[in-house]
Amino acid sequence: MTLQERVNASMALLNDYVASISTVAPASSPLLDHAYRGVSTFALGGKHLRARLVHIAAGQVTGEQLEAATVFGACVDMMHGAFLIHDDIIDRDDTRRGHPTVHAAVRDEFGDAHLGTSIAITTGDLGLNSAIGILIDSRLDDTLVRDALRILNAAAQQTIVGEVLDIAHSISDPDPELVRLSNHLKTADYSFGAPLKLGALAAGRDPAPMEPIARELGRAYQAADDIAGTVGQSVETGKLAGGDVLHGRATLMTMRMEDGADADPLRLAEIIADVVGEGQAHLDVARTLIDKAVLEPGIREDLHEVTDRIEGMLRTYA
């Protein structure tokens, strides 16, 4: 199977699970429809980076190991979808991937902002519960399931703590190192650490060597995302243009910006170059770690390709 075919298998499993939970309620409801549709849309949409990373780290496995990678890929993308739904509430984003977010869609249909927020919170909760449900309903060995749960639980805890720190930046002047810490906690582990470690676990390898690689890739990815959140256009990001500036979010970009810096092209270019340099430094370390790690050649090549793609994202606005 190709890498894309393996990712597709994880998405098929995720889709089947969403279809199965949609039959739990004995009666239909417009709000339940929003919840099920929200989980499905946000988990099945996007580029499936996290599921792809699971399969990259697993390598060319077969049999039970491939089944494990397929399950783990579905779990991480479901968790990602849930976090996006909650994150959109916190960030007050009304669009995601060019479409209304869950809270915005419900708010606009029923004319009730609180109702929109309530349904989005519970929809995100449904997604998080489903990420665990996919795993415990699988046919995987109990020990493997328990080890995977530890990885997913640790990633979820770090993400939640990072999100709280991110929210805290809004009530005080953000310390640059705390901004970096919150970025790392809320993005690097669940987006890179958990998927890469789960892939190694599926293949029967020690997940630990993936940790430092994931950390550097995650920090570089966040740098690229922070640039896009400041200067990216809606058609490219699928979100409000300049949303990080408009909503006063603390990012690697905004923490460097004085009042009016976003309106000064020369100063903005300097800030972008600085953030690109920070992200590039992490990519340089990641490449060294990938080369030194004991990996199958195919896994090494695929990880270098991921690194190259993040570098391309970084330099889009440079």
Image (cartoon, rainbow, N blue to C red):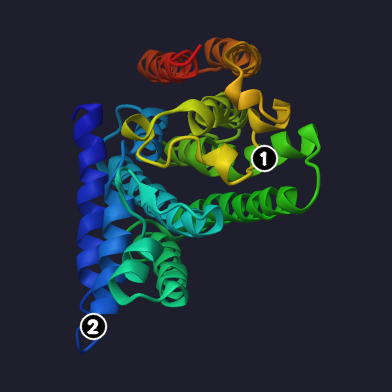
- The local secondary structure at tag 2 comes to loop
Q: Reply above or below: 310 against 167.
A: above
- Relative to 157, 50 lies left or right: left
Rendered residue at 56%/42% (across/down): 246
Residue position for label 1: 250
Residue lying farthest bottom?
26
Q: Nearer the viewer, mark 1 or mark 2?
A: 1
Residues 201 and 286: in front is: 286
Which class describes the residues within 10 Å of circle 1: few (<14), some (14-19), or many (20+)?
A: many
Q: Reply above or below: 176 against 240.
A: above
**Image quadrant containing the N terminus:** top left
Marks 1/2 in contact by CB < 8 Å: the verdict is no
Q: Amino acid at mark 2?
A: Ser
- Relative to 203, 217 lies left or right: right
- Relative to 192, 123 lies left or right: left
Q: Reply above or below: 15 against 112.
A: above
Q: Reply above or below: 167 against 120.
A: above
In the rendered image, residue 113, in percent from the top left (x then y), is placed at 44, 72
Residues 65 and 120: in front is: 120
- Relative to 312, 172 lies left or right: right
Find residue 13 and report its image quarter: bottom left
* Residue 4: numbered disc: none
**Residue 138 appears in the picture as rendered:** no
Mark 1 to mark 2 CA distance (whole Å)? 38 Å
Rendered residue at 22%/57% (across/down): 15
Find residue 199 and report its image quarter: top left
Residues 45 and 298: in front is: 45
In the rendered image, residue 232, in percent from the top left (x then y), is placed at 44, 28
* Residue 29: numbered disc: 2
Rendered residue at 40%/65% (across/down): 103
In the rendered image, residue 150, in percent from the top left (x then y), is placed at 57, 54
